[in-house]
Image: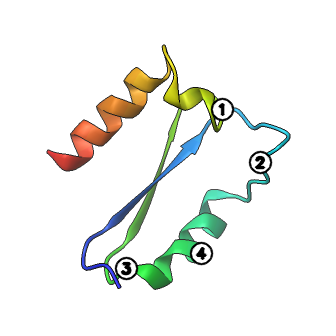
Amino acid sequence: MLQAPLLLVRARQSESTVTAGGPGEAQRDWQPYTRSGVRTESVPGGHITMLLEPHVRALAALVARTLA
């Protein structure tokens, strides 16, 4: 069990190969793995394209803010 809060990053664009429930459902799914909360944020792009330019910049900024 983690002793730190989790950041769940969701892609704003849905892709047919990814089945996505609502943010609340995802938070409930991850909550058993941490003693702290689960925060959900969304970033531009799809499940794969959020890791590519230009969307990866928003993801990197989110991660940097979270770790600061």
Q: Residue 12's x, y, as percent?
A: 63, 35
Q: Which residue is mark 3?
A: 34
Q: Secondary structure at mark 4?
A: helix
Point out which mark residue 19 bears. none
The answer to whether marks 2 and 1 mark residues whose Cβ atoms lie closer than 8 Å is yes
Q: How did the renderer colour the structure?
A: rainbow
The Cα atoms of the two marked residues, 2 and 1, are separated by 9 Å
Residue 34 lies in quadrant: bottom left
Query: Can I make out residue 44 in this image?
Result: no
Q: Which residue is mark 1?
A: 46
Q: Residue 38's x, y, as percent?
A: 42, 67
Point 61% across, 26% down: residue: 49
Q: Which residue is mark 4?
A: 29
Residue 48 lies in quadrant: top right
The Cα atoms of the two marked residues, 4 and 1, are separated by 21 Å
Q: Amino acid at mark 2?
A: Val
Q: Residues within 10 Å of mark 4 (few under 14, many from 20)?
A: few
